[in-house]
Image: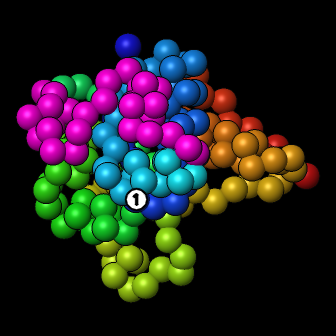
Amino acid sequence: MTRLVVGLTGATGAAYTLRLLRRSRELGVETHLIATPAGILNAHHELGLDRSSLEAEADHAYAPGDVGACIASGSFSTAAMVVSPCSMKSLAAIAHGLGDNLLTRAADVTLKERRRLILMVRETPFNLAHLRNMVAVTEMGGICFPPLPAFYHHPKSIDEMVAETVERVLELAGVGAASPKAWNGL
C-alpha cells in the first residue's frame, strides 16, 4: 500500500488538506496526518472542523510533539510527504533542518531519505526570506508547490479548483491513480 504523510500548518487553505485526505482514501493511499495547533485553528475557522473531526479523515494521526512516532524514522517507508498548506514558519524550519516538532522532523526524514517532499506554500507577497527558504528546500530536493489554480479547464467552483490542485499534488507525490486534467493544447 502507498503511504503518504500529510502535514497541516497554520497557513490558510485547510480545504486542500481535507480534499487530500479524502481523495487519498478514495485511491487506497494510507495517510499519516500531523496537524499543528495553528493548522487546527485554521481548519476550525475555514471548515468548522475540530482536531478529532479532521484526524478522523486520516488513517493515522499524530500530535506535533510525538517525535517518537513511526513517521519520525527513515525506516518507516512512505512514498512522499505533503505539507498542505505550508506556513512560512514551517517552511523556514524545514529549510534550516530544525526538526523541532514531528511535522518538521518528518519533513527532514523525507529529505534525507530522498523521498518526495511537496510544500504547498501559502503566503503573498513573498519576502526575500521566504524566497531564500524555498530555494534552500528546492536545493535539498523538495518541491515548492504554491496551490495556484489553473483556469484553462474552466472550473465552476472553488471546490473544483481545490480538487484539481490536489490531483496534481497526488500525481507529483507518485500516486499513480491520481487523475489531473491534462492540457492538450489549443
Magenta-span inclusion, residue 130: no
Residue 84 vertical position relative to residue 80 in the rendered view, above or below? below
Q: Is residue 124 left or right of residue 158?
A: left
Q: Residue at x 14, y 31 (%)?
A: 69
Q: Amino acid at mark 1?
A: Gly
Residue drawn at 58 percent across, 45 percent down: 47
In this view of the protein, which residue sits in the foreground, 180 or 101?
101
| Residue 91, above or below 114 | below
Rendering quarter of residue 129: bottom left
> Which residues make up the magenta segment?
47-75
Judged from the image, the secondary structure of the residue bearing numbered disc 1 is loop
Count numbered badges in the picture: 1
State the residue at coordinates (31%, 40%). Answer: 34
From the top left corner, tell me how far across and down residue 93 is, in percent. Answer: 23, 64
Q: Which residue is mark 1?
A: 10
52 to the left or right of 166: left
Q: Position of residue 116 (x, y in %)?
A: 35, 42
Whether 69 is among the magenta residues is: yes
Q: For this view, does 169 lie left or right of residue 159?
A: left
Q: Residue furthest right?
A: 186
